[in-house]
Amino acid sequence: MSRILKDIRRLRGQTAQETAGRMNMSLRTYERFEAGGTRLNQDYLHRFARATDSDANGILLAIVVRAPDFAIDGADNQLATVLTSGMSRFVRTQGSAIALLSARDVLEITGEMFSALARKIEEARLARSFIAEGQADLAATRPRPGR
């Protein structure tokens, strides 16, 4: 978790002092938290997420799935919070009826969801590539200054 916290803080261009101030805690307390010198404190984790405009659920999920970069990659789109909120609503509305689902059904539906998300990622990559190529083409045809 220490690496995740440091990477997110650095991604946001914040010093430890700035983040501690935004979390309303002393620098020393923050440094212990960031270094993993204390037990996981959900209050601190949520304060950190607010202070760095990141996703507390993403940080926790990154630890669970052993993928530290997930917390960073999902910091802006709040992917883990969206998934967790969706699951929370599903549990609230369906309650014990969830037991009626088979593992096969759950795997099929979540597989479809993740495949659809992967298609959206590919669409975004293609769009970024198109824009970058277009900008390069336009820059190449633009007259140079002073000529």
Image (cartoon, rainbow, N blue to C red):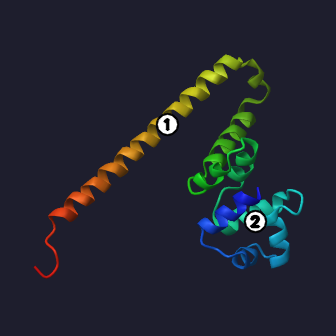
Please give the residue where the numbered disc 1 appears in the rendered image: 118
Quadrant where the C terminus lies? bottom left
Q: Is residue 46 left or right of residue 73?
A: right
**Callout 1: SS:** helix
Residue at the spot 75% in from the left edge and 47% down from the top edge = 63
Q: Residue furthest bottom?
A: 146
Q: Position of residue 136 (x, y in %)?
A: 25, 59
The residue type indicated by label 1 comes to: Ala
Kindly indicate the quadrant of the structure image that contains residue 34. bottom right
* Distance from the alpha carbon under mark 2 to that under mark 1: 31 Å
Q: Position of residue 72 (x, y in %)?
A: 62, 55
Within-10-Å neighbours for mark 2: few <14, some 14–19, many 20+: some
* Location of residue 110 in the rendering, given as x and y in whole percent from the top left corner: 61, 29
Quick check: 96 left or right of 62? right
- Mark 2 and 1 residues: CB-CB less than 8 Å, in contact? no
**Quarter of the image that includes the N terminus:** bottom right
Q: Which residue is mark 2?
A: 47
Who's the residue at 58% across and 27% down the image? 111
Q: Along the line of sight, which residue is nearer the eye, 81 or 92?
A: 81
